[in-house]
Amino acid sequence: MERILVSACLLGLRCRYSGERKADERVSGLLKRQDVVLIPVCPEQLGGLPTPREPAERRDGGVWNRAGQEVTEQFFQGAGEALKLAKLYGCSRAILKERSPSCGSGQVYDGSFQGKLTQGDGVTAELLKKNGITVTGESGADRI
């Protein structure tokens, strides 16, 4: 049985910065499979950030929220906790929220808060990859 770390927001938990739901049917559909166990995490909450919270974006190796406050430390703390859970449960794969400053893989918002994307990974996605965990966004969940 494969254990997969998954962004809790993709399962419909209200942990997104806005406090709104963002369930993804492709990810939720994996709950019906007998050969997969999903381990939900929200790195931003694990890092001590509240919900709701100011939206944040990656810039210059760190993370800042729209109010101009640096929240890099909380993002790195949450990434570390997510990695601990991945190791604890033996996850070799993660399905994470695309474009997120925590979870984005391949593309994240550029820090201008104008909806512009740039190449790169969110803090958690980057740490998981460095530790040998394959990271996929929700658009790839139907290929698992």
Image (tube, rainbow, N blue to C red):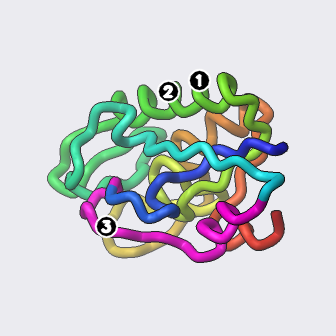
Q: Is residue 90 magenta?
A: no
Residue occupied by mark 2:
81
Q: Amino acid at mark 3?
A: Phe
- Looking at the image, is 18 positioned above or below residue 47? below
Q: Residue at x 19, y 42 (%)?
A: 69
Q: Is residue 135 left or right of residue 115?
A: right
Figure check: 18 above or below 133: below
Direction from residue 64 to residue 86 in the image, left or right: right
Mark 3 crowd level (few <14, some 14–19, many ≥20, 10 Å Cα): some
What residue type is disc 1 on?
Lys
Quadrant location of the N terminus in the rendered image: top right
Amino acid type indicated by mark 2: Glu
Q: Nearer the viewer, mark 3 or mark 2?
A: 2
Q: Residues within 10 Å of mark 2 (few under 14, many from 20)?
A: some
Disc 2, SS: helix
- Counting from the top left corner in percent of width and height, residue 82 is at 54, 33
Check disc 1 and report the residue beneath it: 84
Query: Which residue is depicted at the point 48% across and 53% down?
Result: 8
Task: Measure how far apart labels 2 and 1 are at the Cα level.
Answer: 5 Å
Q: Does residue 32 appear left or right of residue 121 in this picture?
A: right
Look at the numbered discs 3 and 2 and tell me whether their residues touch, using CB distance below 8 Å: no
Q: Count every numbered label the image shows and give the total.
A: 3
| Residue 71, image x, y percentages | 29, 37
As drawn, which residue projects farthest toward the left?
A: 67
For the record, the magenta segment spans 15-33
Answer with the quarter of the image where residue 12 lies: bottom left
Question: Picture coordinates of residue 17 (x, y %)?
Answer: 29, 57
Q: Nearer the viewer, residue 75 or 4?
A: 4
**Secondary structure state at the residue bearing disc 3:** loop
User: Between marks 1 and 3, how big is the CA–CA gap?
Assistant: 30 Å
Image point 36% across, 32% down: which residue?
47
